[in-house]
Image: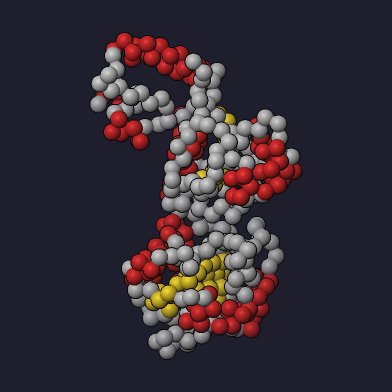
Amino acid sequence: SLLERNKVAYDIGAYRDAPAGLRIWCGPTVETADVNALMQWVDYAHTKIKSGDIKKMRIIITDGLAEGAVKALSTAGHEVVKKKLSKEELAAGALAEWDAIIIRSATKLTAAVIKATADKAGSKLRLIARAGVGVDNVDLKAASAAGIMVVNSPLSATNSVVELALGHLLAQARQITRADRTLREGKWLKNELVGHELAGKNLGFIGFGRIGQALGRVAMALGMKIHVYDPFLPDSVLANFGATRHATVQDVFRACTHITIHAFLSPQTRHMVNAEMIGLMPGVAPDGTKCGNHIVNCGRGGIIDEEAAAAALKSGKLTSLALDVFEVEPCGKSPLFESDRFQASPHIGASTIEAQNRVGAEIAGAVIAALDGSPPAGNLVNKDVQPKFGPARAAKM
């Protein structure tokens, strides 16, 4: 319709695609006079919001966000500010003056930070939005206790993380990183840089969620055999991959020369990959190839014991290690850097143009919906939360 094309009004069938705003149900019992009376107040509210006299909510973005997402939030009538906050400011309850905060991985919202915010007189914080998948930098228990909703954007970065993990797997198999480094040093190591194919090798997944499954499909296409440890996964999912399910992490490491990590960091997974686990890896593939042992982590830092991994690289038990995530970020000095069998990237799994645009759009939509009182089920992380505040209201008429 003309109104929809000009983004003025939307038919009920397309309301989910409309920007946040007033929903008016004009059913068969609504008279023209009713609509005329209502429109006076709609015009009043529109004028006030447009002039800046009324702001629906104040949103702070501390770790950056795509400009399109910032524009979407502003267009929805919210006040949006990009501002970094120090650890000291967070600990002092600086978030109390904001209705919502959008973060990535850098800002840490610990239990102490959330409590300091919630305990501050007049605290308004009602929403924490993680632009990305992992929420291990947010204390979910503390957020729920304070009545603060937590949303994330689990769908947007899948392709980008999968492609980076695949890139690391291929670079390990063909020693691409080592070849590049030595060639720059003036060395022509053609006879030494003998790699192996991924086809016919067992690839073990620690965690087989959305990203793991997407990588699994690519790995299958390359001829790899899928092995999984994920105690939360239904058997029906694994059936689609012809995957071998293992009851313990140890069993996966015993079976696989290649391991990829796609789990969240928790007390149970911290340093899960240690000297003992690495020592279980076979070094020889089912097809008889002596390909060595290889690990990739594009999931969460801290799951791999980096000191143990460095020792395993030095001893030769671990042939190569590829990390996109580290226990401490930014990563400064590390014993891992001493090995030419180590390759790394600085937490860039979601750092593609496409992923950043999708992450921004998804989290902006989730924030707008959550502040309007209807957080999308697929984005709400702490589903047991009892929100401290009701939906946003533009004005009291």
For the point 41% across and 57% down, the residue is 159
Q: Toward the viewer: 60 or 165?
A: 60
Q: Is 137 displayed left or right of 67 in the figure?
A: right
Q: Toward the viewer: 176 or 58?
A: 58
Q: Is 277 displayed left or right of 1 in the figure?
A: right
For the point 65% across and 41% down, the residue is 84
For the point 45% across and 18% down, the residue is 46
Q: Where is residue 228 shown, x and y percent of the image?
A: 45, 72
Q: Is residue 388 above or below residue 350?
A: above
For the point 50% across and 79% down, the residue is 251
Q: Where is residue 90 shown, x and y percent of the image?
A: 70, 42
Q: Is residue 132 above or below residue 183?
A: above
Image-quadrant location for residue 114: top right
Q: Is residue 394 above or below residue 118?
A: above
Q: Where is residue 88 shown, x and y percent of the image?
A: 74, 43
Query: Could you tell me how many numbered marks the image carries?
Result: 0
